[in-house]
Amino acid sequence: MIKFGPGNLRIPRFEKPVYVVAGGLTDYRKRYPEKNSSQLCTEALRMAVEENDLKVSPEEFRRMVNWVVYSQFADHFGDQLLAASKIHDYIGFDPLGNIEVKTGGATGGSSVLAAAQAVASGYATCVPVVGWERMDEVPTKVGNAYIASAACKDFESELGWMYAAYYALMAQRYQHENKVPRETLAKIACKNYEHACYSPYSQNPGHYTVEQVLENDMVADPLSFLECCVMSVGAAVLILADEETAYRMTDNPMKLTAICGGTHTLRTADRRNMPILLLPNETEDTYKDYFTEERSEWPGFSSFLAARMAAYLAYNMAGVADPIEDFDLLETHDAFTISDVQTYEDIGLRPYGRGREFIDSGDAYMDGRLPTNPSGGLIGTMHAVGATGIFQLVEVLWQMQNKWDHFHAEPERWARYGKTKPEDFRSLQVPNVKRACAISHAGTGSHVTCSIMEKP
């Protein structure tokens, strides 16, 4: 049994406050042959610098940057090693220093963590985080195999070379332990596809019923095609800065009060039993009846210790007592409907074994207690892996700055991407967002980051 020491559970702190200044996106597509990766990253950076009401010109901004973090999941897709160096030169930051981060699906979140550490330590004062993925230069089957190699190739990859197969096993175990009907998982997909309908950036919007999700073709039992994320091409940029620099650039920066990471074994079968790590809104009594014949170990095969660890550190770092009460907005890494409901428990929205209550109660909807994934998430809008965790925080930033309509509702923005604003469009601006959270997740829970953004 694993037991933590006090050093393991030390709560991180920033030596200097970290602020989020601006963000930019491209749209996301299955294929994007007309633009290369450098062009997509430039487009996202231009939006961040030129369309976020900054008080500095693009040239002034360029002269303020002193470190850059790049985020790309896999060199395989674009067949280009050191792609970050190529993009760094293309967008005009050479010869400034940079690093490229790779932690699977959590690459975007980990890249923001690396940038925040640079600002918080005083190493840098202005850090763009630039993420992208080029997933259209290989067939979908080959792309699935590349992604599947982010699991343990000695054991798990041989089960099918497809991530949906790994999560299908988790879904079966989770349903066995917690008696969760498939209808609950289908509701998550319906919600996120619906939200994607109101985003000009989305790749896979749609209005679906629970029945349509359940009756859709099966990828890996019990997950249908409509319960799995998309493979995307696109880019995202987030600009971090220290306090002085942030307010030189904008009158409305947001504070990144916490961003923390957790990891767990790459091979899920290696995950050993341990006492449940309690979040601030939990006590030992919360789980006095948790362990049964069906649930004899934790985290087992149905919970993500990496997500629990990231949330534990971030909540304590930011002073979060109860996520349902303290957050006004949440973005989760909904790679699959099952991973979403698992995450509800890992981050304390409901105790372990009761994650279904978060969606079934209505709390996760736009008129609920904690609107979740108004961006459309990975299922409805995008999963250009290196950009994904950054995309989440860009959407959070715009919500907190009350700019969601500006970046989603203007007909000209839809036309920019060759789309027409829907006649049934509705605003997904969450009113008065003071504190928000975003979860970036990799593998079968091998890496997770938890970010908390607040109004200063």
Image (cartoon, helix red, strand yellow):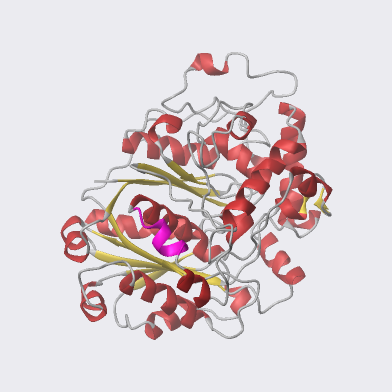
**Place of residue 325 in the rendered image (x, y in percent of width and height, measured from the top left):** 41, 30
**Place of residue 33 in the rendered image (x, y in percent of width and height, measured from the top left):** 61, 84
Q: Which of 408 and 74 lies nearest the eye of the viewer?
A: 408
**Residue 350 magenta:** no
**Residue 403 magenta:** yes
Can you see residue 238? no
Residue 129 appears in which quarter of the rendering?
A: bottom left
Can you see residue 262? yes
**Place of residue 185 in the rendered image (x, y in percent of width and height, measured from the top left):** 70, 40
Residue depicted at x 34% and y 68%: 128
Residue 23 appears in which quarter of the rendering?
A: bottom left
- Number of numbered labels in the structure image: 0
Q: Is residue 358 left or right of residue 68?
A: right
Give the magenta range. Answer: 402-409
Residue depicted at x 35% and y 69%: 48
Q: Is residue 175 left or right of residue 447?
A: right
**Place of residue 45 in the rendered image (x, y in percent of width and height, measured from the top left):** 38, 74
Q: Is residue 125 left or right of residue 48?
A: left
User: Considering only vertical position in the picture, is 127 above or below 57?
Assistant: above
